Amino acid sequence: MVAQMDNKPLDGKVAIVTGAGRGIGRVIALHLAGGGALLALAARSPSQLQAVQAQIEDAGGRAISIPTDITQEQDVIALVRQTVERLGRLDIVVNNAGIGAFGPLVEASVEQWDRLMAVNARGTFLVCREAIPHLKQHRPSYIVNIASVVGVKGYLNQTLYSASKHAVMGMTKALARELQPDGVRVHAVCPGAVDTEMAGEARPDLDRSGLIQPADVADAVYFLVTRQGAAVIDQIDIRRAGSTPFA
């Protein structure tokens, strides 16, 4: 269900969330809607998007569904254009869509590498590039890139995934400096293992009952796009209780 907030600090703001049909993206979208934001929901599955849209609208919010393959330039151009045309503006972008590939590097295919980079790195690049001219029109505005602990550390049998998330982290750090004069705040959220299908695939040895929940990540995103003050938080690391600190 949509997280209902006591106040509506995002009232009138417009947010794009990629990968919004399920998992972390779905919960982020519901949290932002609960704070009053108008949502543009992007993912490849129309049926999943429509289900999330219905949840938001049933709770009194507003959302539109825009089926999007973020690896395709024309899809991303259409996503941003339709968002601004239908909702009137753009204030927040959450680059959440991502995929994983796991196993020894010597067993990886070029196709796996290309697909991972296309979704995790190229997709983030395309969404940012198209959104930035609109984000610059409002101060402050926000880009929140959902990276990963593997964008900070290295893990066994996660070399390809780690490389793609390191690319996201590099893009985030550089963009934060590039867009600072324009009032666009660029953040990274780096969770450890979250209780999603991807976590089960990457680490079948983990007890999923102790994993980070999607709502924990959504809380961090909501905090970043609603906090007041002059200070900017560049990166939030989220780890499960009892795990090794990132540093």
Image (spheres, rainbow, N blue to C red):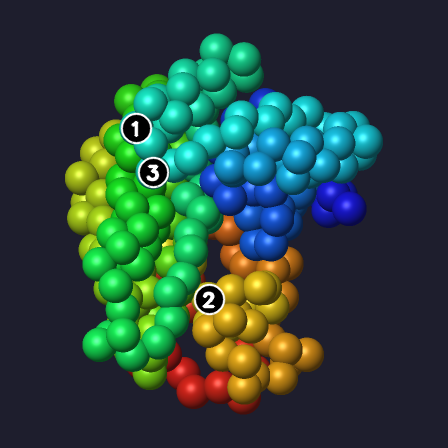
Rendered residue at 38%/58% (across/down): 147
One can see residue 185 in this view: no
Whole-angstrom CA distance, mark 1 to mark 2, is 27 Å
Amino acid under label 3?
Thr
Rendered residue at 51%/71% (across/down): 201
Secondary structure type for disc 1:
helix
Amino acid under label 1?
Glu
Tag on residue 191?
A: 2
Tag on residue 73?
A: 1
Tag 1 and tag 3, C-beta contact below 8 Å: no
For marks 1 and 2 on the same chain, the one whose residue lies earlier in the sequence = 1
In this rendering, the answer to whether 59 lies above or below 150 is above
Tag 3 and tag 2, C-beta contact below 8 Å: no
Secondary structure type for disc 2:
strand
Residue 118 rendering spot, x and y as whole percentages: 29, 46
Which residue in the structure is indicated by mark 3? 71
Closer to the eye: label 3 or 2: 3
In this rendering, the answer to whether 127 lies above or below 90 is below
Secondary structure type for disc 3:
loop
Rendered residue at 55%/16% (across/down): 87
Tag 1 and tag 2, C-beta contact below 8 Å: no
Whole-angstrom CA distance, mark 3 to mark 2, is 23 Å
In this rendering, the answer to whether 198 lies above or below 47 is below
Q: Nearer the viewer, residue 12 or 120?
A: 120
The crowd level at tag 2 (other Cα within 10 Å; few <14, some 14-19, many 20+) is many
Quadrant of the image occupied by residue 10: top right
Residue 187 rendering spot, x and y as whole percentages: 36, 50
Residue 79 rendering spot, x and y as whole percentages: 44, 24
Residue 131 rendering spot, x and y as whole percentages: 34, 28
